[in-house]
Image (cartoon, rainbow, N blue to C red):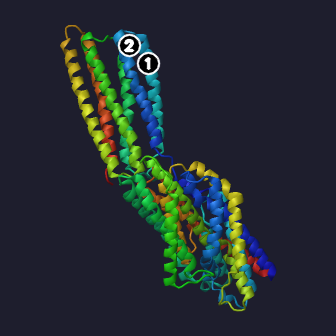
Amino acid sequence: MKIPILKLFKKSPFKPLRLHMEKSIETISFLKELFDFLSKGDYEKIEEIAEKIYKLEHECDKIKDEIRDHLPKTLLLPIARTDLLSLIHEQDELPDKVEDIAVLLTLKRISMPDEIKEEFSIFLERILDTVNQAFEIFKEMDNVFETTFSKKEIEKIHSLINELEEKEWKVDKKACKIAKIILSLENKLSPVEIFLWMNIIKELSTLADHAESMGKSIRLMIAKV
Amino acid sequence: MIIWLIFSLLGAGYMAFVLGGNDAANAMATSVGSKAIDYKRAVIIAAIANLIGALLVGGHVTETIGKGIVKIELFINEKKIFILGMLLSLISAGLWVQIATHLGMPISTTHSIVGAVIGFGIFAGGFNYVYWSKFLKIVLSWIISPILGGIVSFIIFKIIKKFIFETKNLILSTKRIGPFLSSFVFFIITLSVIYKGIKIKVPLFQSIIISISFSFLGYIITWSFLRVEERGNGYSQVERLFAILQILTATYMGFSHGANDIANAIGPSCAIYSIMKSGSTKEFLIPIWILFFGSFSLALGTALFGYKVIKTVGEEVTEITPTRGFSAEFGCATTVLIFSKLGLPISTTHTIVGAVIGVGIARGISSLNLGVIKNIVLSWILTVPFSAILTGITFTILKFIV
């Protein structure tokens, strides 16, 4: 039996997108353990966690493809399709970057210089904070949809996005500080180690960049049509 | 000749059965989808509201199907031909619905019966046996009805947004706007029943006065239903209150559906009865017992077969909430009722699709597949000629046997 009304309703793309977000957060939450083991010098554990990250990243990819496959142009969404696609793109960069970082840590056995340990844990904390903020904004979108883009809910999201931008800025500042420390250790660390550390710092701070970009996509999404 | 009437009634009963079983699900989809009412209640509401709508307002479209498309007066000396034609229209339309459903096409019984009657007219007497201007009006109504349904739903949903979601005290606003919206429903239903009604005929001014009184009554009833204690000020409470309001719009949907679609089933039978009973063709008779028989079959179809479809729809349509369902049903039912009053046979299914899209355009639904529009348009463009030809062929063959 064909019921036209059944064909009219499509599953919301926001549900799998949320699942993707949750998995991304799960992937990112491994970063702390990863660097904890690095500072302890437990390289086997690092390999172990890296494997978990690869697996999760792959799952995220699958969800992403699934969402994209079910977004034909004939779909009527409350937001612009292109904004949704750019949000998916930015969001999927998160597990991608975590994977890159895990790879970097398994390329060569390096150790964490004592000089950065304290700053680094704050750095990680701030990155997680930034990504979580993006997730909070994402969750707030539910209310925006429920109220069909009421001014109140849009304003709430705007202020959350402003906070997000500030958090990202703080991450950048911390990244700069740690980079400076690493470079100042030129006599202690080998050029290879410095090279790897600079890359790790760069990749980590792009996590916050992508979280910020997610906020930007969401800002566009909820703008007046 | 009475045997022909019995045949036509069997056909009418079958058609009403199919309508009740199939189309009621589309009418109830947004109620069960939003979980405002469970499928058992939906079946009961659909069956009863269908019955009442068909009985009270079903006559207008019935008259159109019976004598508004084919020039009945041209058959005054060939009553048998007319009776056969009408009977075959009914059978062919039913057959085409079966074939199309089997092929998975989202066709409408309305288009099928209109096409069938036209086919009979052309094959029986030629092109001048059909009221083409009326046909054009009907075709226009098929295009306008989903659009109008969409526009009304869009407006209703925007009202809900502006006067509820944009306010500080959501619950208070809901309790204020809810009864106001439902008083409209009461007004329209009352007006549709008493003004130029089938059995009841009240002049316009008095009709309006009576309808306003009923809308006040509706206001008070709804107000008292919405007085339930709701703690907090969240959006989910608004939805819960609208789930109560959706009982009203679900009834409204059933009522309008019955008012429009009953004609597809009993139109031909009433035409046959009219030409048999009255010597002249001036008078079109809608005997209350045929109306009741049709309405009852419709309700029975819903009760016996509709529950399965309604259950399926309720399980699979999940992306709709009571505020959205309310808006879509309001828009759809109002449109269908207006067209019923104008005597224009339209598709409830297509109108609810239009209405839901209207809510979607108002940014109310997370994702709708507009590809379905193409299928709908294609299927009705195919349905009219196919059921016309089917009727024409069976008619041309059987004409010689009778």
Residue at the disc numbered 1: A49
What amino acid is at disc 2?
A: Phe
| Quarter of the figure with the C terminus of chain B | bottom right
Looking at this view, is A105 or B262 the one in front?
Answer: B262
Q: Name the image quarter holding residue B379.
A: bottom right
Residue at the disc numbered 2: A37
- Helix, strand or loop under label 1: helix
Looking at this view, is B369 or B22 the one in front?
Answer: B22
Q: In the image, which is nearer the foreground, mark 2 or mark 1?
A: 2
Above or below B60: residue A77: above
Q: Position of residue B351 (x, y in %)?
A: 52, 65
| Quarter of the figure with the N terminus of chain B | bottom right
Q: CA distance from mark 2 to mark 1?
A: 10 Å
What amino acid is at disc 1?
A: Ile
Q: Residues within 10 Å of mark 1 (few under 14, many from 20)?
A: some
Q: Looking at the image, can residue B101 be seen?
A: yes
Looking at this view, is B111 or B323 the one in front?
Answer: B323
Q: Looking at the image, can residue B138 be seen?
A: no
The reply, left or right, for residue A110 in relation to residue B120 is left
The subunit letter for the residue under badge 2 reads A
The reply, left or right, for residue B378 in relation to residue A26 is right
Q: Position of residue B397 (x, y in %)?
A: 75, 76
Q: Are marks 2 and 1 in contact (CB under 8 Å)?
A: yes
Q: Tell me the residue at 51%/46% (across/down).
A: A11
Q: Residues within 10 Å of mark 2 (few under 14, many from 20)?
A: some
